[in-house]
Amino acid sequence: MKTPFRSLRSLFWISAVLLTIIFAACQKHPATQNYFPENGPQALHQISLDLQSGVRVLSLALRPGYEDLAALAYLRLAQGATIASAYVSNGEAGESDLGTPYPDQLAGALRLEADAALAYLNGEAHFLSQPEVVAARDSLAVRRSWHSDSLSARLAGLLLKYKPDIILVARDWAAPEQSWQTKVLLSDLLNAVQKIQPKPTNGSAVAINSDSLWQVGRIWVDDPSKSGMSVPVDDKHPEWKKSFKAIADEAGAKYASLRYQRKAWQGTQQPSYTLLHPQTGATLQTLTENCPDFASFRYLRSMAGRMTQLASAAREKSRKELGPALLTAIDYVSKQVEQPGRAHALRLENEPRPAAE
């Protein structure tokens, strides 16, 4: 038989749960919107950016929810970059808004949410599926779960799949300074980059084509202990009239199981990036400044298809407005082809190659 006290306590907990559900339902969530239409002025604007870019950006985070969605939104929508985000673990042992679910349930939910968040920004997600290391006092504790040969090999495969020109390494939001997990990740990442660097054959230069020219151009790290370069995510998109951070918040809303946790992690902190690779004395003002030539050269191969898309997107655009966009794209192609050695490289790539012996 229940006592009045026990009944009141049960009623209290039921009321608390109901109030939590009502509060969550009433909370204002960012409205969703398609920022990559197939035609119209916004499509024309985006495809024009894509034609002038060709840069591939890969975000690398310890777990889903740690990636810098605002920076990715800016690079995709303001710079025309191709974006992807990879996660070392599936986040199965970390904190979430779901209380204490089974690890495989949390991992499954986070993978789906990461896919949705990246798809919202016209990117894709990739999972290395290493065990999650929640707390580590030194690198040895991390190495018990992340063996160097295994993680380095998976990172090398990831790089060869996406061929990024720029890598953004997200911070460990659970640590006030750079964590041991991040340090181990950076060490294995540099090893992977070194392994896949193109090497000259027979003492001559590497054959010139889009694959052999590729190499990781830059690795930027969001290190909470350093004051680095900030991405202008508060700038507004000229067509959508929203800040890139606001667009990223819409993408972040896909993380239903981390809605409150992500806010608790980030607080008022803003990511800032320092250059890890290559070691150079040059001072860069933006993440993509003076991006390697092979990025734009590689993109010339798909130029015909992109120009067709541009024409299709222009159906709702007046001829007067279409002209400048087409001229910009044509001027860009001409500039790339006329650069020293670029036309010769293009010819080399299109020439038939001798059959392998």
Image (spheres, helix red, strand yellow):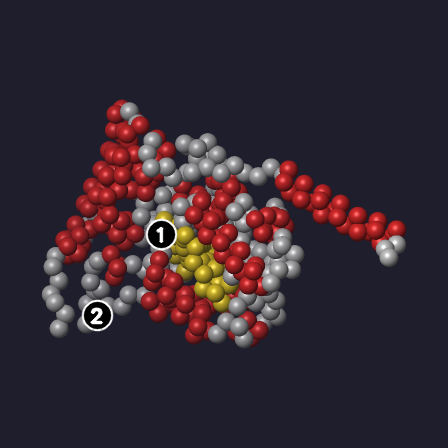
Residue at 41%, 32% (x, y): give it: 239
* Residue 149, numbered circle: none
What whole-number distance in Å separates the C-alpha atoms at marks 1 and 2? 26 Å
**x and y, in percent, of residue 10 in the image:** 79, 51
Q: Nearer the viewer, residue 273 or 283?
A: 273
Q: Is any part of residue 191 visible from this angle?
A: no
Which residue type carries mark 2? Thr
Q: In this view, does 206 lie above or below 311?
A: below
* Residue 56, numbered circle: 1
- Secondary element at image label 1: strand
Q: Which of marks 1 and 2 is in front?
A: 1
Please rate how many residues cluster around mark 1, counting C-alpha atoms within 10 Å: few if below 14, some from 14 to 19, many from 20.
Answer: many
Q: Is residue 198 above or below residue 45?
A: below
Quarter of the C terminus within the rendering: bottom left
**x and y, in percent, of residue 289 in the image:** 37, 47
Quarter of the N terminus within the rendering: bottom right
**Residue indicated by mark 2:** 201
Residue at 47%, 49% (x, y): give it: 116
Q: Is any part of residue 128 visible from this angle?
A: yes
Figure quadrant of residue 135: bottom right
Q: Which mark sits nearer the N-terminus, 1 or 2?
A: 1
